[in-house]
Image (cartoon, rainbow, N blue to C red):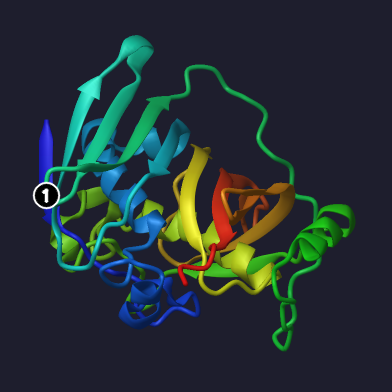
Amino acid sequence: MNWQATALNTAPDSENQIHSDELAKEYGFKGGLVPGVTVSAYLLHPVIELLGKSWLERGYANCKITAPLYDGETFEVSSEDFKEGQINTFLKNQEGKIIANAESKLLKDSIPKPIYRGDPIVQENYKAPVASFTVWEKLKKEGCKAFKFYWGGDKPLIYLSNEKKLPKLLQPNEVGYANLCFLLGCSNWILAGNAFMNPWVHLQTKSQNYRPVPMDTTLISEMSVKDFYEKKGHEFIEVDVNLFENKSLQCCMSINLLAIFKLRSNK
C-alpha cells in the first residue's frame, strides 16, 4: 500500500531555526527542514488508516529520520506487513531516496502505564538555560520542569495543509483525536523548554499509545534525561517523556526521543 502527499513545514517560525531556510542553509541543507515529528506523522498515516482507533489506544512505533524532508516536496510512504503483526513503513522523497522509516505494531498484552510524578510545572516567565552537558547532568540529577500543552482551538496543529486528507479519526472537524505531529511535538517542546537549543535536529522517537486524546484536552508533559554524549562532532540528547491527561492524570502516551542538540560546525 503506497500513499503520496506534499510535505508541509509545520514549524517555519520555530525558535529552532533549523526549520528556517536561512540558518538551515548555513549548515549545508537546501532549506528549512520539515520537523521530524511531522515526518513521523507521515510514516504512521497509512498505519492509522489501516488500524484506526486501535492504534491510538495501544499502538507502538519506532520512527527514524535519516535525511531531511523539505517543505513542498512530494513524498511517498510505502508499507509492508512483517512478522507478528508488525507494519514497516518507508518514506521516499521526490528523488526516490528513503529518508525515514518506522516499525509499528499493536500491543498485544497490557503493560504498566507510566505514573504521574507531579513534577513542578514551568512558570510563565521561566527562561531555560542554554543546553550543554553540564545542564543535562543537572536536569538528570535534579529533575526537569513539566509543561502543559493544549490540543484544540481554532487551528490545531496538523501535518497536512488540507485536513480532509487526514484519516477521519484525526480530522479536527470530524472525530478530532490528536495526531502524531502534535503528540510527538510535545516531546520536542518540553525538551526545548528545559534547555534552549538552536539549531537542533530531531532524529528518532519510540512511542507507545495508551489512549486517544480528544479535542479540547490539556496534557501535562513530564520529562527525564536518559543519556547525552558526543559522536562525530555532534552532541546528542536522549530523554523519556510521558503525556498525561490533565484531569484524570492518566497516561496517554510515552515517548523516548533522541536528538542532536548541538550540530557540529559546517565552517
Residue 244: x and y in percent read 62, 53
Q: Is residue 50 visible?
A: yes
Residue at 81 percent across and 67 percent down: it is: 120
Residue at 70 percent across and 85 percent down: it is: 124
Q: Is residue 101 above or below residue 36?
A: above
Tell me: 68 left or right of 140.
Answer: left
| Amino acid type, callout 1 | Glu
Local crowd size for mark 1, using a 10 Å CA cut-off: few (<14), some (14–19), many (≥20): few
As drawn, the residue found furthest toward the top would be: 83
Tell me: 167 left or right of 119.
Answer: left
As drawn, the residue found furthest toward the front would be: 267
Residue at 55 percent across and 68 percent down: it is: 149
Q: Nearer the viewer, residue 65 or 256?
A: 65
What residue did someone put label 1 on? 95
Residue 18: x and y in percent read 42, 71
* Image quadrant assignment for residue 156: bottom left
Residue 252: x and y in percent read 55, 46
* Marker count (numbered): 1
Q: Is residue 215 above or below residue 252?
A: below
Residue 80: x and y in percent read 21, 23
Q: Nearer the viewer, residue 250 or 146?
A: 146
Q: Nearer the viewer, residue 165 or 22?
A: 22
Residue at 30 percent across and 64 percent down: it is: 158
Tell me: 4 left or right of 92.
Answer: left
Q: Element type at marker 1?
A: loop
As drawn, the residue found furthest toward the bottom would be: 125
Q: Quadrant of the N terminus?
A: top left
Q: Is residue 239 visible?
A: no
